[in-house]
Image (cartoon, rainbow, N blue to C red):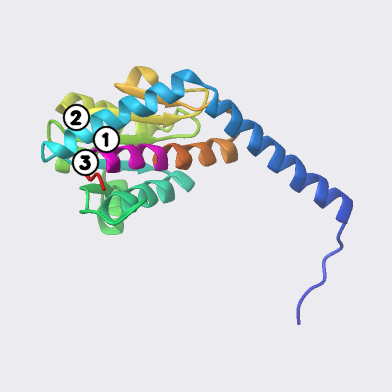
Protein backbone atom coordinates (compact mmCIF):
# COMPACT_ATOMS: atom_id res chain seq x y z
CA UNK A 1 0.00 0.00 0.00
CA UNK A 2 1.38 3.40 -0.99
CA UNK A 3 1.88 5.96 1.75
CA UNK A 4 0.18 9.29 1.18
CA UNK A 5 2.31 12.30 2.11
CA UNK A 6 0.87 15.72 2.92
CA UNK A 7 1.54 18.11 0.07
CA UNK A 8 1.80 21.86 -0.04
CA UNK A 9 1.40 22.49 -3.76
CA UNK A 10 2.23 26.18 -3.53
CA UNK A 11 5.43 25.62 -1.53
CA UNK A 12 6.58 22.79 -3.77
CA UNK A 13 5.89 24.80 -6.91
CA UNK A 14 7.86 27.69 -5.40
CA UNK A 15 10.78 25.37 -4.59
CA UNK A 16 10.76 23.97 -8.13
CA UNK A 17 10.56 27.40 -9.74
CA UNK A 18 13.34 28.73 -7.52
CA UNK A 19 15.60 25.82 -8.39
CA UNK A 20 15.01 26.24 -12.12
CA UNK A 21 15.61 29.99 -11.83
CA UNK A 22 18.92 29.44 -10.02
CA UNK A 23 19.87 26.83 -12.62
CA UNK A 24 19.12 29.20 -15.50
CA UNK A 25 21.01 32.03 -13.78
CA UNK A 26 24.01 29.74 -13.21
CA UNK A 27 24.03 28.69 -16.86
CA UNK A 28 23.75 32.30 -18.02
CA UNK A 29 26.64 33.32 -15.77
CA UNK A 30 28.69 30.44 -17.16
CA UNK A 31 27.88 31.43 -20.73
CA UNK A 32 28.99 35.00 -20.04
CA UNK A 33 32.19 34.09 -18.17
CA UNK A 34 35.00 34.76 -20.67
CA UNK A 35 37.60 33.05 -18.45
CA UNK A 36 35.54 29.84 -18.38
CA UNK A 37 34.94 29.92 -22.13
CA UNK A 38 38.65 30.36 -22.82
CA UNK A 39 39.54 27.66 -20.30
CA UNK A 40 37.25 25.10 -21.96
CA UNK A 41 38.92 25.75 -25.31
CA UNK A 42 42.37 25.45 -23.69
CA UNK A 43 41.41 22.15 -22.02
CA UNK A 44 40.09 20.83 -25.33
CA UNK A 45 43.44 21.80 -26.89
CA UNK A 46 45.38 19.80 -24.31
CA UNK A 47 43.13 16.74 -24.50
CA UNK A 48 43.17 16.79 -28.30
CA UNK A 49 46.98 17.00 -28.38
CA UNK A 50 47.30 14.15 -25.87
CA UNK A 51 44.88 11.81 -27.65
CA UNK A 52 46.36 12.63 -31.06
CA UNK A 53 49.81 11.67 -29.75
CA UNK A 54 48.59 8.33 -28.37
CA UNK A 55 47.90 9.49 -24.82
CA UNK A 56 44.77 9.02 -22.76
CA UNK A 57 42.37 10.94 -20.60
CA UNK A 58 41.84 9.90 -16.96
CA UNK A 59 39.04 11.35 -14.83
CA UNK A 60 38.11 11.09 -11.15
CA UNK A 61 35.66 12.54 -8.66
CA UNK A 62 33.62 11.67 -5.58
CA UNK A 63 29.88 11.06 -5.28
CA UNK A 64 28.01 12.84 -8.06
CA UNK A 65 31.37 13.82 -9.52
CA UNK A 66 32.30 10.12 -9.70
CA UNK A 67 29.21 9.59 -11.81
CA UNK A 68 30.28 12.57 -13.93
CA UNK A 69 33.73 11.02 -14.39
CA UNK A 70 32.14 7.85 -15.76
CA UNK A 71 29.70 9.85 -17.88
CA UNK A 72 32.53 11.87 -19.43
CA UNK A 73 34.70 8.81 -20.11
CA UNK A 74 31.73 7.19 -21.81
CA UNK A 75 31.24 10.17 -24.11
CA UNK A 76 34.86 9.86 -25.28
CA UNK A 77 35.00 6.08 -25.71
CA UNK A 78 31.56 5.84 -27.32
CA UNK A 79 30.32 9.00 -29.06
CA UNK A 80 28.79 12.37 -28.30
CA UNK A 81 27.53 14.30 -31.35
CA UNK A 82 28.00 11.74 -34.12
CA UNK A 83 29.51 8.37 -34.96
CA UNK A 84 33.32 8.32 -34.94
CA UNK A 85 36.27 6.30 -33.70
CA UNK A 86 36.61 5.75 -29.94
CA UNK A 87 38.85 8.13 -28.00
CA UNK A 88 40.95 6.84 -25.09
CA UNK A 89 39.37 7.84 -21.77
CA UNK A 90 39.21 6.10 -18.40
CA UNK A 91 37.23 6.87 -15.23
CA UNK A 92 39.22 6.00 -12.09
CA UNK A 93 35.97 5.45 -10.19
CA UNK A 94 34.90 2.09 -11.60
CA UNK A 95 37.41 -0.51 -10.34
CA UNK A 96 35.83 -1.42 -7.02
CA UNK A 97 38.48 -4.01 -6.13
CA UNK A 98 41.31 -1.57 -6.74
CA UNK A 99 39.54 1.31 -5.02
CA UNK A 100 38.67 -0.69 -1.91
CA UNK A 101 42.14 -2.25 -1.70
CA UNK A 102 43.84 1.15 -1.92
CA UNK A 103 41.39 2.71 0.54
CA UNK A 104 41.81 -0.17 3.00
CA UNK A 105 45.59 -0.38 2.80
CA UNK A 106 46.57 3.28 2.31
CA UNK A 107 43.50 5.40 3.13
CA UNK A 108 40.83 6.99 0.95
CA UNK A 109 42.97 10.06 0.32
CA UNK A 110 45.16 7.84 -1.91
CA UNK A 111 42.36 6.13 -3.86
CA UNK A 112 43.01 8.10 -7.07
CA UNK A 113 46.67 9.10 -6.73
CA UNK A 114 47.82 5.47 -6.68
CA UNK A 115 45.79 4.75 -9.81
CA UNK A 116 47.35 7.78 -11.47
CA UNK A 117 50.80 6.52 -10.46
CA UNK A 118 50.03 3.06 -11.84
CA UNK A 119 48.34 4.06 -15.10
CA UNK A 120 49.48 7.59 -15.94
CA UNK A 121 52.21 8.33 -18.43
CA UNK A 122 53.79 11.66 -19.41
CA UNK A 123 51.59 13.30 -22.00
CA UNK A 124 48.35 11.88 -20.58
CA UNK A 125 45.69 14.20 -19.16
CA UNK A 126 44.17 13.84 -15.70
CA UNK A 127 40.91 15.62 -14.85
CA UNK A 128 40.02 15.89 -11.17
CA UNK A 129 36.45 16.94 -10.38
CA UNK A 130 35.74 18.51 -6.98
CA UNK A 131 32.73 20.74 -6.36
CA UNK A 132 34.19 21.93 -3.06
CA UNK A 133 37.64 22.53 -4.52
CA UNK A 134 39.11 20.80 -1.46
CA UNK A 135 38.63 17.03 -1.89
CA UNK A 136 41.86 15.58 -0.45
CA UNK A 137 41.95 12.58 -2.77
CA UNK A 138 41.50 14.79 -5.85
CA UNK A 139 44.14 17.30 -4.72
CA UNK A 140 46.57 14.42 -4.02
CA UNK A 141 45.84 12.88 -7.44
CA UNK A 142 46.42 16.23 -9.18
CA UNK A 143 49.74 16.61 -7.36
CA UNK A 144 50.80 13.07 -8.31
CA UNK A 145 49.81 13.62 -11.93
CA UNK A 146 51.86 16.82 -12.07
CA UNK A 147 54.82 15.01 -10.54
CA UNK A 148 54.63 12.35 -13.25
CA UNK A 149 54.42 14.83 -16.14
CA UNK A 150 50.73 14.56 -16.95
CA UNK A 151 48.68 17.57 -17.94
CA UNK A 152 46.38 18.31 -15.01
CA UNK A 153 42.88 19.76 -15.17
CA UNK A 154 40.60 20.64 -12.25
CA UNK A 155 36.85 21.10 -12.49
CA UNK A 156 35.64 23.01 -9.43
CA UNK A 157 33.37 25.83 -8.26
CA UNK A 158 34.29 29.31 -7.15
CA UNK A 159 36.54 27.80 -4.46
CA UNK A 160 39.03 26.29 -6.88
CA UNK A 161 42.21 24.24 -6.68
CA UNK A 162 44.07 26.32 -9.25
CA UNK A 163 47.44 25.93 -7.55
CA UNK A 164 47.22 22.14 -7.96
CA UNK A 165 46.35 22.07 -11.68
CA UNK A 166 47.76 23.29 -14.96
CA UNK A 167 44.23 24.24 -16.05
CA UNK A 168 41.42 25.00 -13.58
CA UNK A 169 37.84 25.40 -14.74
CA UNK A 170 36.25 27.24 -11.79
CA UNK A 171 32.58 27.54 -12.72
CA UNK A 172 30.69 30.60 -11.41
CA UNK A 173 28.71 29.01 -8.59
CA UNK A 174 29.21 28.00 -4.97
CA UNK A 175 26.12 25.73 -4.79
CA UNK A 176 26.87 22.04 -5.36
CA UNK A 177 23.81 21.17 -7.51
CA UNK A 178 24.53 24.02 -9.92
CA UNK A 179 28.28 23.36 -9.95
CA UNK A 180 27.53 19.77 -10.96
CA UNK A 181 25.20 20.91 -13.75
CA UNK A 182 27.85 23.28 -15.08
CA UNK A 183 30.56 20.61 -14.88
CA UNK A 184 28.69 18.13 -17.06
CA UNK A 185 27.78 20.92 -19.50
CA UNK A 186 31.46 21.89 -19.67
CA UNK A 187 32.42 18.26 -20.24
CA UNK A 188 29.99 18.00 -23.15
CA UNK A 189 31.40 21.18 -24.68
CA UNK A 190 35.00 20.00 -24.28
CA UNK A 191 34.23 16.54 -25.64
CA UNK A 192 32.38 18.10 -28.56
CA UNK A 193 35.37 20.31 -29.37
CA UNK A 194 37.77 17.36 -29.20
CA UNK A 195 35.46 15.27 -31.35
CA UNK A 196 35.29 17.98 -34.02
CA UNK A 197 39.08 18.33 -34.09
CA UNK A 198 40.15 14.69 -34.05
CA UNK A 199 37.18 13.12 -35.86
CA UNK A 200 35.69 15.70 -38.22
CA UNK A 201 32.61 14.61 -40.08
* Residue pictured at 26% horizontal, 35% vertical: 126
Task: Quickly name the residue at label 3.
Answer: 198
* Residue pictured at 25% horizontal, 37% vertical: 197
- Number of callouts: 3
Task: Looking at the image, tell me whether mark 2 or mark 1 is earlier in sequence order.
Answer: 1
Quarter where residue 14 is shown: top right
Rendered view: 64 above or below 170: below
Task: Looking at the image, tell me whether mark 2 or mark 3 is earlier in sequence order.
Answer: 2
x, y percent for residue 150? 19, 29
Rendered view: 123 above or below 68: above
* Residue pictured at 53% horizontal, 41% vertical: 181
Task: Looking at the image, tell me whether mark 3 or mark 1 is earlier in sequence order.
Answer: 1
Identify the disc placed on residue 2. none
Query: Are discs 2 and 1 less than 8 Å apart at CB?
Result: yes
x, y percent for residue 161? 40, 23
Left or right of 106? Residue 66 is right
Task: Quickly name the residue at label 1.
Answer: 126
Q: Residues within 10 Å of mark 2 (few under 14, many from 20)?
A: many
Magenta segment: does it hold 189? yes
Task: Quickly name the residue at label 2.
Answer: 150
Q: Main secondary structure of the magenta part?
A: helix
Rendered view: 38 above or below 19: above
Distance from disc 3 to disc 1, alpha carbons, whole Å, reads 19 Å
Magenta segment: does it hold 138? no
SS for tag 3?
helix
SS for tag 2?
loop
Amino acid sequence: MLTSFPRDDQAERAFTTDFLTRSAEGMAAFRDDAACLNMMVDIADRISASLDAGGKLMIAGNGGSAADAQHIAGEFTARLMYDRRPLAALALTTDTSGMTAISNDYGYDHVFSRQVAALGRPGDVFVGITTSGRSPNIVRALDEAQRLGLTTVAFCGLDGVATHADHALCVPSSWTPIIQQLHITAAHIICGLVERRLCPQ
